[in-house]
Amino acid sequence: MSHPFDQLVVPAENHTKLAIPPVAEYPSAARRNAMLNGAILVDGEPLTTFRPKARSAAIDVARAYTLSLGLDPGPIADPGPIADPGPATDPAALVIGSGHQPLPFHPGIMIKPAALVQAAREMGATPLFMTVDSDEFRAEYLPLPNMENGRLEKMEFPLFPMKKHGLYETAEAEPVTDMLDRFQAMVGFLAHPRLETPRRALESYLETLRNTHLDFPGYVSRAIVMRRAWLAPEVDGFLELPVSLLSKEKTFLRFASHILADIGRFAGEYNRALDEYRKERKLRYLANPFPNLETREGLIQAPFWVVEGGERRKLYVKVAAGKASALVLENGEERPMSAVIEGQMAIRPKAITLSLYLRMALCDLFIHGVGGAKYDHVTDAIIERYYQARPPESACLSATLWIDVPAEDPRPDIAETERKIRQIEQHPEKAGAGKTEVDQLAAQKEKLVRTIKAPGADKKSIGASITKLNHLMAAELSGERRALSAKLERLAPVELERQAAQARDYPCFFTPKRSCLPWPD
């Protein structure tokens, strides 16, 4: 089940985390999930037997892929079914998963593979990390702390410039030397003594990269190895699986084909869940968290992308007399319904559909970040209504760790200064108490305030007089008002420096590993 929405808040302070449930409870949650919903039918087969097939196949693919990258896949558990939910339950049957896009992660995301490995080791389960490489690749600009004109700023650095539009899974990797040169250029931006800690951390990571095999043709493989290079050896020994490879696996294609064949009912529940999600949270933007599936005469949009020519396109299902009859591409070209299961069409799941498969068929517990945990309220509604089943528990894990750059915190001073300005504007008699001119005007205002409460008082006229007196008192305090405004102007760049120092999205390699690994409790 999803967690209360108001609890899903990104941690704001340094060295804080959000863990729902606590990492120590992952094993018990995974065991409870393993016993759920065995009678659900997927492509006509009970989940009890479908699930072991799905995870066995996925683990085989993930192990081969992980080894191909020169990484340690860790011990592989037996993905067979669990027969007994009691204390003697064999944990080797369990799979714990998490995932993210193939970006350079900040420490608050790195906590997920760390927790994944910790929980799996404690219970002997298989840890599986999914890389969502089916998203669109954009030039990867990374936030970088920089001293410009003697002040700390947060700039955007083009670490992985995009050569052409496409998906992560089809993005080519530039020559390793070019990438390492760009990392070295980043070191130059951190030359100021104030940035010594992130500079030393980056230099250490760069040395690690120089001794790591990174010569892969694709961006995704390189990004995964670079992430693992930072995590190891403290966090290591787990499976890596890109969504693009999972999407080619037979049991996933059976799952997808089942939905496509029943697209009318599935799309109805999918859109209903999204509509209710937006209504409950008063969200006006119709693409928040995701757009509804389009429905128009004879066509219903599928909850999958079709990948052709290195790009992803919308996929539709042609429906006649309530029955799915053909798959339709954006250009109107039709394909038989069998094209998916026969591997004649490359499809990728949308976020909610991917979450459905991971939580129901592949993993006994899936660890989301805050964003995923929020949209999983939609996933839960689909599981409850479409599958008529109880949603399995999921985990939400996120953290905040600032880079070690000293910065003054002017927020209390700013708040007090703004309070004084508001007092001058709204209650000048209090702000200027003790000043003769203000006290005289305040006495007149006090009389008018008493008068306006009397029966039959001309409230409009008296109110106008009170307003005029407020303006006169504020005018007497104009010097104080200007001084306070000038103080706010002086504090503004200090606050910008604080924001730059305390941004949580700097990549992990600006942070010494000793300060955050191993992170989970």
Image: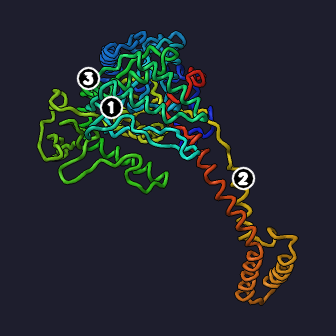
Q: State whether residue 171 is above or below residue 32.
A: below
Dot 3: what SS? loop
Q: State whether residue 211 is above or below residue 358.
A: above
Q: Nearer the viewer, residue 401 or 273?
A: 401
Q: Residues within 10 Å of mark 2 (few under 14, many from 20)?
A: few
- Cα gap from disc 2 to disc 3, whole angstroms: 58 Å
**Dot 3 corresponds to which residue?**
249
Amino acid, disc 2? Asp
Q: Is residue 467 visible?
A: yes
- Cα gap from disc 1 to disc 2, whole angstroms: 45 Å
**Dot 2 corresponds to which residue?**
413
**Dot 1 corresponds to which residue?**
133
- Depth check, mark 2 against mark 3: the one in front is 2
Q: What's the residue at 72%, 58% (across, down)?
A: 417
Q: What's the residue at 27%, 36% (across, down)?
A: 259
First in sequence, mark 3 or 1: give its number: 1
Dot 1: what SS? loop
Residue 355 lies, in percent from the top left, at 38, 33
Amino acid, disc 1? Asp
